Amino acid sequence: MAQNAPMLAFAQKKSLPLGKTIPMNIEKDAVVGITYTLKEANSGDVVETVTEAQPFYFLFGFGNLLEEFEGNLQGKRSGDSFDFKLSPEQAYGPVDSTAIVDLPVSAFMIQGRFAEEYVKEGETIQMQDPDGNALPGKVLKRGLETVTIDFNHPMAGKHLHFAGTVVEVRSATEEELDHGHVHGPGGHHH
Ligand code: ZN
């Protein structure tokens, strides 16, 4: 915040009209709202679109998002656009072959019957790790005795292309900093 001090002094001298706010740069502890399109960089396939109707809000500098993603937004202001690519190493990592596993068909029984309505090739299903944590996995292949499940992040091994606009930058409230997430529109309601 120290870098804003000369600006404030200047504003006071010029007696800015009340209610006129000084544009804020994206920095640690800022609440940031953005719209964007995420494409898989190599194929150009659109993965996700976030529009003005419901911008994506996040608390900057809290490790909630990919470090390289935040690095590309740092210093920008409301109205600025962005357009950058992340390699798998900067994003969700390479595909880990040990995260692709064959599980016995018996692991997919519901009330003694194979859950074929859920376990379809190409579908993502919710499973549990030994600690009971939810673990989404994609069904790659259903065999006679085993089902092949890919537990890699869906964007593992992919180059990501983000392009969009910063629609809001404001200071986080004490409560937001305390909770580590954004409140209000686009954030948590509680
Ligand atoms: Zn909260």
Image: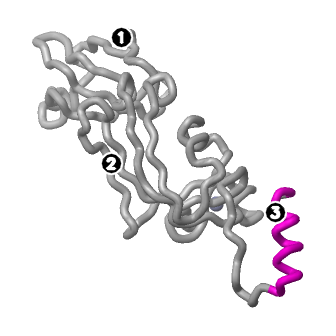
Q: Position of residue 53 (x, y in %)?
A: 37, 70
Q: What scheme was used to colour the molecule?
A: one colour
Q: Is residue 130 left or right of residue 146?
A: right
Q: Secondary structure at mark 3?
A: helix
The residue labelled by disc 1 is 97
Q: Answer with left or right where residue 70 lies relative to residue 15.
A: left
Q: Residue at x 70, y 83 (%)?
A: 20
Q: Which x, y percent locates residue 44?
A: 25, 38
Is residue 53 or residue 187 the one in the foreground? 53
* Residue extent of the magenta highlight: 2-15
Q: Which mark is residue 4?
A: 3
Q: Quadrant of residue 52?
A: bottom left
Instruction: Tell whether position 7 is magenta.
Output: yes
Return the residue at label 2.
Answer: 48
Q: Main secondary structure of the magenta part?
A: helix
Depth order, front residue of 88/41 = 41
Circle 3 packing at 10 Å, graded few (<14), some (14-19), many (20+), is: few
